[in-house]
Image (tube, rainbow, N blue to C red):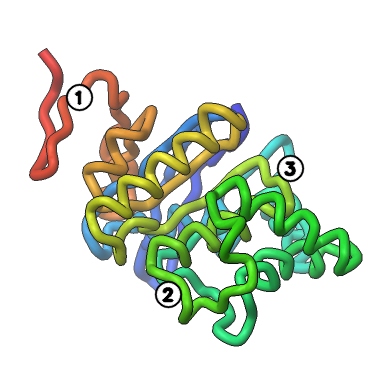
Amino acid sequence: MLIHLRNVSKTYGDTYALRDVDLDIHAGEYLSIMGPSGSGKSTLFNMIGGLDHCTTGTVEIGGVKLNTLTDGQLAYFRGRHIGYVFQSYNLIPSMTALKNVALPAVLAGNPTIAAESRAREVLGKVGLSERVDHRPDELSGGQQQRVAIARALVNTPTIILADEPTANLDLHTGEQIIELLQHLCHELGITIVTATHDHKMLKASHRIVWIKDGRVDRIENVADLTIEEGGMERAG
């Protein structure tokens, strides 16, 4: 197992956002997290990515217990092992695609020339070799999301966390982004964890974790389900 959560709870005052969550995620797995607004889905997503601290319990990635790290150590760990893709892209408007993608590599201590060389490489992998000098406002939504995925890849992460990565995209572009994430998982062995409401995203997954009232309600294998745009049912 790559990621272990044990007895993870998160409270805000007397309110539980997560309660006693146990979850294992395999290396090279594509896992989707589903749940209604307020269910704890985003909190769980943030715990897995080390973006928030659990109140009780442990989150372990590759044998490292995140709750034992200082803020500086955690930032270092995230920068080298986890890539993040957000639904709003979170690109810096004044910077070109190349500069946006190179930035995490520069922040990780790489010389600018080496960081930009790596950025060109990963932009090529996501099909944007001809757009490296374009700013975000010169790119379509799908192209901006590809830049965001390239940025997540630049430091060669073990895990990519994708938060609603198709939410702002049209059907065709969303399918292209899903295919790209599938390629990263299946061909490069990167573990993908996504929070989503998009049933198309669910089809690409190996497993779905359903969150309800801050708890893991159930975990299902996608192979056991028939998933359509409007819903799903158990196969057979």
Mark 2 or 1 closer to N-term? Answer: 2
State which mark lies toward you, 1 or 3. Answer: 1
Q: Residue furthest bottom?
A: 94
Q: Position of residue 90 (x, y in %)?
A: 51, 74
Image quadrant where one finds the N terminus: top right
| Cα–Cα span, label 3 and label 2 | 28 Å
Local crowd size for mark 3, using a 10 Å CA cut-off: few (<14), some (14–19), many (≥20): some
The residue under label 3 is: 64
Q: Is residue 68 visible?
A: no
CA distance separating discs 2 and 1: 38 Å
Question: Mark 2 = which residue?
Answer: 13
Q: Which residue is mark 1?
A: 225
Q: Residue at x 51, y 51 (%)?
A: 161
Q: Position of residue 191 (x, y in %)?
A: 55, 37
Contact between labelled residues 2 and 3, with CB atoms less than 8 Å apart: no
| Furthest residue toward right | 111
Horizontally, residue 61 falls left or right of residue 135, namely right
Point 46% across, 72% down: residue? 139
Residues 73 and 144: in front is 144
The residue positioned farthest toward the front in the image shown? 130
Q: Nearer the viewer, mark 2 or mark 1?
A: 1
Q: Label 3, secondary structure: give it.
A: strand
